[in-house]
């Protein structure tokens, strides 16, 4: 119980309210969203349970959007939000499956359809990126004229800039005569998440490219050293190999021949063999280049067909 209380007090709460009419008057954008600080968990629970006051003069009579943000320092604090979750379920803010979604740590998103409403739930992966857990639902209003409001319960890391998400996307202005919805918020969050993942992947690729380039540079330096050493010792090695052949008799006495008359046989075998080796390498190199060109053309054709389809 003590751990639960300490983790709960480490949370902070914020609220935001608007309506389709307010957004329409602002040019279908949420400009300078007035996000209010909520003092504690008790006030956050009251925000969920209290029905909003309908004010036609401020364009807050129908198609309301109400958002409660619970900011957490750590993802593990999600498992200590039972009061918020149970109150939200009782008020119709969330579907019962969302509670299991949070308790099991399920990653991903889902659309839940009820008899009179629809909900979307999502939870980002447990990686190095800031986490977001969200439930957004339609909420039937009371009274003779039943209208649709939208409510959203959002658990987010403290570094998440909610104003950015609210301002980023334009509100869908082509809903009439359908009921307006606020799905632009989860869409914007998902797009931001993909951009963050793409940035992480780009950084990872750049890091591995640098490592590969550094390794290639080291290999190149090693090969260069070997090549220089080979050039230095190759002439002396060649001369030593030739002079060590039995074609030369360095112990010959005066008047005897030092060089054998069959020395020509060495050149008769060595020169053609060298030409055969060089010719074989040239043929292999040309064949490998043709095969590489064929594979490249095939890959390009496959990519073009995929783009067309």
Image: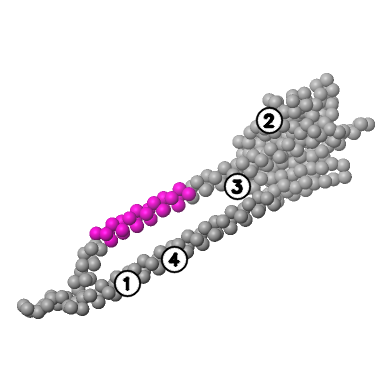
Camera-near label (3 vs 4) is 4
Q: Nearer the viewer, residue 81 or 307?
A: 307
Q: Nearer the viewer, mark 1 or mark 2?
A: 1
Is residue 222 in the magenta section? yes
- Between residue 294 and residue 107, name the one nearer to us: 294
| Distance (Cα) linking label 2 and label 3 | 26 Å
Please name the residue that numbered disc 2 is placed on: 167
Residue at (34, 53) in percent of width and height:
221
Quarter of the image holding residue 244?
bottom left
3D distance between C-alphas at marks 1 and 2: 79 Å
Residue at point 34%, 68% (across, down): 275
Please tell me whether residue 254 is drawn above or below residue 236 in the rendered image: below
- Name the residue: 25% across, 75% down: 266
Q: Does the stretch in magenta take in 104? A: no
> Could you tell me how far apart the alpha carbons at marks 2 and 4 are, in whole angstroms?
62 Å
The prevailing secondary structure element of the residues shown in magenta is helix
Q: Are marks 2 and 3 in contact (CB under 8 Å)?
A: no
| Chain part drawn in magenta | 209-232
Determine which of the numbered discs, if any, sits on residue 284 in the image: 4
Seen from the viewer's position, the closer of residues 246 and 198 is 246
**Residue 22 drawn at (x, y percent):** 78, 25
The answer to whether 197 appears left or right of 211 in the picture is right
Question: Which residue is at the front of the view, 309 or 173?
Answer: 309
Instruction: Please name the residue that numbered disc 1 is placed on.
Output: 272
Foreground mark, 3 or 1? 1
Residue 119 seen: yes
| Mark 2 residue element | helix
Where does label 3 land, which residue? 127
Residue at mark 4 to residue at mark 1: CA–CA distance:
18 Å
Is label 4 in a helix, a strand or a loop?
helix
Tag 3 or tag 2, which sits nearer the N-term?
A: 3
**Of label 3 and label 1, which has the lower sequence position?**
3
């Amino acid at each position: 119980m003590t751990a639960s209380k300490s983790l709960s007090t480490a949370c902070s709460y914020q609220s935001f309210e608007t309506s389709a009419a307010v957004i329409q008057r602002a040019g279908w954008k949420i400009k300078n969203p007035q996000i209010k600080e909520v003092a504690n968990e008790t006030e956050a629970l009251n925000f969920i349970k209290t029905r909003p006051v309908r004010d036609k003069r401020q364009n807050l009579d129908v198609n309301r959007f109400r958002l409660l943000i619970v900011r957490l320092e750590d993802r593990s604090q999600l498992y200590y939000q039972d009061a918020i979750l149970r109150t939200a379920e009782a008020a119709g803010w969330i579907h019962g499956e969302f509670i299991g979604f949070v308790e099991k740590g399920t990653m991903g998103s889902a659309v839940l359809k009820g008899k009179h409403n629809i909900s979307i739930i999502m939870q980002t992966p447990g990686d190095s990126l800031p986490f977001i857990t969200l439930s957004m639902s339609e909420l039937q209003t009371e009274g003779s004229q039943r209208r649709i409001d939208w409510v959203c319960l959002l658990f987010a890391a403290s570094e998440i800039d909610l104003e950015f998400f609210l301002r980023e996307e334009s509100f869908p202005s082509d809903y009439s005569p359908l009921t307006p919805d606020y799905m632009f918020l989860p869409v914007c969050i998902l797009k931001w998440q993909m951009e963050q993942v793409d940035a992480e992947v780009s950084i990872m690729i750049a890091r591995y490219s640098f490592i590969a380039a550094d390794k290639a540079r080291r290999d190149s330096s090693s090969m260069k050293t070997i090549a220089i050493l080979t050039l230095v010792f190759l002439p002396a090695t060649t001369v030593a190999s030739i002079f060590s052949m039995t074609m030369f008799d360095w112990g010959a006495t005066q008047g005897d021949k030092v060089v054998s008359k069959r020395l020509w046989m060495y050149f008769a075998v060595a020169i053609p063999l060298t030409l055969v080796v060089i010719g074989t390498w040239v043929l292999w190199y040309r064949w490998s280049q043709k095969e590489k060109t064929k594979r490249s053309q095939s890959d390009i054709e496959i990519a073009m067909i995929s783009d067309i389809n």
